Image (cartoon, rainbow, N blue to C red):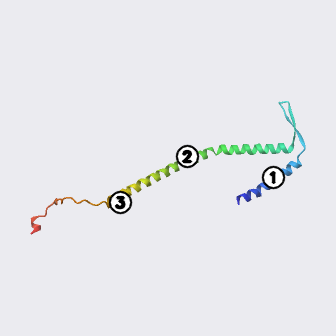
Amino acid sequence: MFKFLSWLIVAPLVVLVAVFSVINRQPISIDLWPLPITAEVPLYAIVLGVLFFGVLWGGLAAWISGGKTRGRVRALTRQMEAAERDRIHLRDKLRKADEAAKEKAEAPVLSGPETPALNPPDKADAA
């Protein structure tokens, strides 16, 4: 779908640029005033060149202005990865603790000598 929409926008632009280039082929003189340089260049080359450099300049400005956001995203990604590693570590630690508790619960209880009661019954209770 995205590819179709991009072609729907790009194809007319390509046709428009081609028609503009064919119509504006007449040469114009460019004089770089402090320098003794003069050049005859077709009008479409100047317009398309300025447009090209404008797009590059705008893209560079957008990329530079997005630097802080990209840095924050990188930092948050690192924090998420560290949290995921901690979660996995704690999950493994909990599983080992559960296994140890289960083994302890299933272990046979060794019976030892009977321990005398701490509070022997009163003689009155026995009678």
Give the residue drawn at x 58%, y 48%: 73
Residue 118: x and y, percent? Answer: 16, 59
Residue 124 on image: x %, y %: 9, 67
Q: Nearer the viewer, mark 1 or mark 2?
A: 1
Extreme-right residue of the structure: 26
Task: Identify residue type, mark 3.
Answer: Lys
In screen coordinates, is 31 left or right of 88? right
CA distance for labels 2 and 3: 40 Å
Residue 26 lies, with reference to residue 9, above or below; the image says above
Q: Is residue 48 above or below residue 120?
A: above
Q: Which mark is residue 102?
A: 3
The three-letter amino acid code for the residue at tag 2 is: Ala
Figure quadrant of residue 4: bottom right
Q: What is the quadrant of residue 9 in the picture?
A: bottom right
- Quick one: SS at disc 3? helix
| Residue 75 numbered mark, or none | 2
Q: CA distance from mark 1 to mark 2?
A: 41 Å
Crowding near the residue tagged with mark 3, few <14, some 14–19, many ≥20 C-alpha atoms within 10 Å: few
- The amino acid pointed to by label 1 is Val
Is 69 or 10 nearer to us in this picture?
A: 10
Per the image, label 1 sits on a secondary structure element best described as helix
Kindly check if marks 2 and 3 are in contact, taking CB atoms under 8 A apart as contact: no
